[in-house]
Amino acid sequence: MSSDLEKRVARLEAIEAVRYAFNRYFHAIDNNNIDLLINEVFTKNVVLEVANYPPGSGKNLLLDTEEKIRAVYGPIKADGHRHNATNVSVLVNKSATKAQVTAYFVTTMAWGNQGGVYEATFVPDDDGTWKAKHWLVSSQWGWRLADAGMELPAPYLYEPPSVGTKHGGYQPK
């Protein structure tokens, strides 16, 4: 196989590995599996940035330690929401040492929807997988049902996404 072809194949394999890791984020938070998020999605030195948080403040929340990430993501229950991404773009550099990801997202909740953009930088980890070194969540729009309380999810969202699935609500490994 030519050197050029080997590089192109390596980049294609990297793109697929990054897509897999990117989607692990959604499986992790929708199932409230923070260990999966910490160990399989993010690098040990990840910087997670949440734009305009709290909403309307104009400030960005920076989470740069495992403890800070657990404090924000840990209380999110595995009911009441589902995350979806679309228009996912993965651009791997020529040496296959870094990937830039952008995607639109919609989060469906019992009492409304919100959406925005994810931007992330992925790098290969020592174990051969790709993990996010930087993750930006930019929630840009949303709506809420005025007569629905935020404390009680709709009946179809009571159970975590793992219920009734063959892979436990996760991607097969």
Image: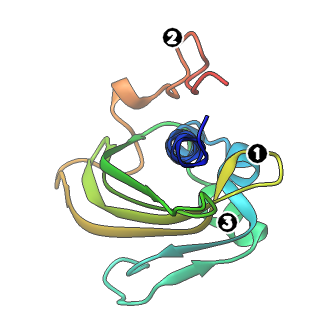
- What is the C-alpha distance between the residues marked 1 and 2? 31 Å
Up the image or down, 101 lies above or below 85; here it is below
Up the image or down, 164 lies above or below 23; here it is above
User: Which circle's residue, 2 or 3, is located before the other in the chain?
Assistant: 3
Residue wearing tag 2: 164
The foreground one among 4 and 138 is: 4
In this rendering, the label closer to the viewer, 3 or 1? 1
Look at 36% across and 25% down and name the residue there. 155
Counting other residues with Cα less than 10 Å from the Cα at mark 2, is it few (<14), some (14-19), or many (20 or more)? few
Quadrant of image for the N terminus: top right
Amino acid type indicated by mark 3: Ile
Rendered location of residue 17, percent (x, y) = 58, 41
Residue wearing tag 3: 69
Amino acid type indicated by mark 1: Gly
The foreground one among 31 and 93 is: 93
Look at 41% across and 78% down and name the residue there. 51
In the picture, residue 167 is in which quadrant? top right
Amino acid type indicated by mark 2: Gly
Rendered location of residue 144, percent (x, y) = 21, 56
- In the image, is 166 to the left or to the right of 142? right
- What is the C-alpha distance between the residues marked 2 and 3? 29 Å
- Looking at the rendered structure, the secondary structure element under dot 1 is loop
- What is the C-alpha distance between the residues marked 3 and 1? 23 Å
- Looking at the rendered structure, the secondary structure element under dot 2 is loop
In this rendering, the label closer to the viewer, 1 or 2? 1
Rendered location of residue 166, percent (x, y) = 57, 9
Residue wearing tag 1: 128
Rendered location of residue 172, percent (x, y) = 62, 21
